Amino acid sequence: MHPNLQRLHELRGIARHALMRQFLDAVIALHPAGQLPPRAALDPREVAELLPHLVLTRVDYATGKPRFKLTVIGEQTNSAIGLKLANRYMDEAQASDMPSLKYPIEDRETVVREGLALYRYGPPRLEYKADFATIELCHTPMADDGITVSHILSVTVFEGLTG
């Protein structure tokens, strides 16, 4: 079993919110046993209920150091952040609009480096519109070649805001 698939099963056991468990079930279902799942394995129709909460990040290696472009941001997440981040590189948005984006950048760097899902529950580290809400989040790697992280699929549950 791939280490990330094992990690996702472990996270499923500690997930607090039904939406997080639903996300983990969906990611486990598309994950092959011996490698990371490709982006193409994600069918939006299969995760329609999750779409308002998902973020898809493309990993760009052109500069040698991974950069993260937010290609899809679900409406619930976008509304909670209160800043237009879709189709922007996170480092550029951090420099111009949101200095606290350094934390989700660091999280994604960890996912790329380790090739494993990252989970966190607790107070947010970002300064944003709904930063009063405790969050439960998970970033999970995807790899078009099965090995090199090319995308990161994320979900954030905003406690008290997410139904």
Image (tube, grey):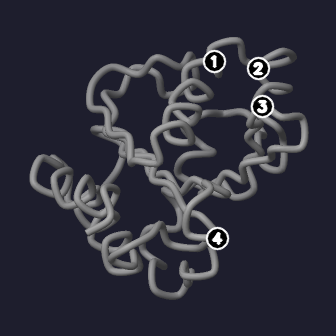
Residue count near mark 1 (Cα–Cα under 10 Å), binned few <14, some 14–19, many ≥20:
some
Structural distance between the alpha carbons of marks 1 and 4: 28 Å
- Of tags 3 and 2, the one toward the viewer is 3
Q: Quadrant of residue 114?
A: top left
- Of tags 2 and 4, the one toward the viewer is 4
Q: Is residue 15 left or right of residue 101?
A: left
Which residue is depicted at the point 89% across and 43% down? Answer: 62
Amino acid under disc 4 = Asp
Image coordinates of residue 159 in percent, x first then y, are 29, 38
Amino acid under disc 3 = Lys
Q: Verify CB contact (< 8 Å) between mark 1 and mark 3.
A: no
Image coordinates of residue 27 in percent, x first then y, are 38, 69
Residue 43 in the image: above or below residue 90: below
Q: Nearer the viewer, residue 82 or 51?
A: 51
Q: Is residue 120 left or right of residue 71?
A: left
Image coordinates of residue 116 in percent, x first then y, are 40, 47
Q: Verify CB contact (< 8 Å) between mark 1 and mark 2.
A: yes
> Which label is found at residue 145?
4
Q: Which residue is mark 1?
A: 102
Quick one: label 3 or label 2, which is nearer the N terminus? 3
Quick one: label 2 or label 4, which is nearer the N terminus? 2
Residue count near mark 4 (Cα–Cα under 10 Å), binned few <14, some 14–19, many ≥20:
few
Q: Verify CB contact (< 8 Å) between mark 3 and mark 2.
A: no
Q: Which residue is mark 2?
A: 94
- From this viewpoint, which residue is outermost toward the left? 13
> Which label is found at residue 65?
3
Amino acid under disc 2 = Gln
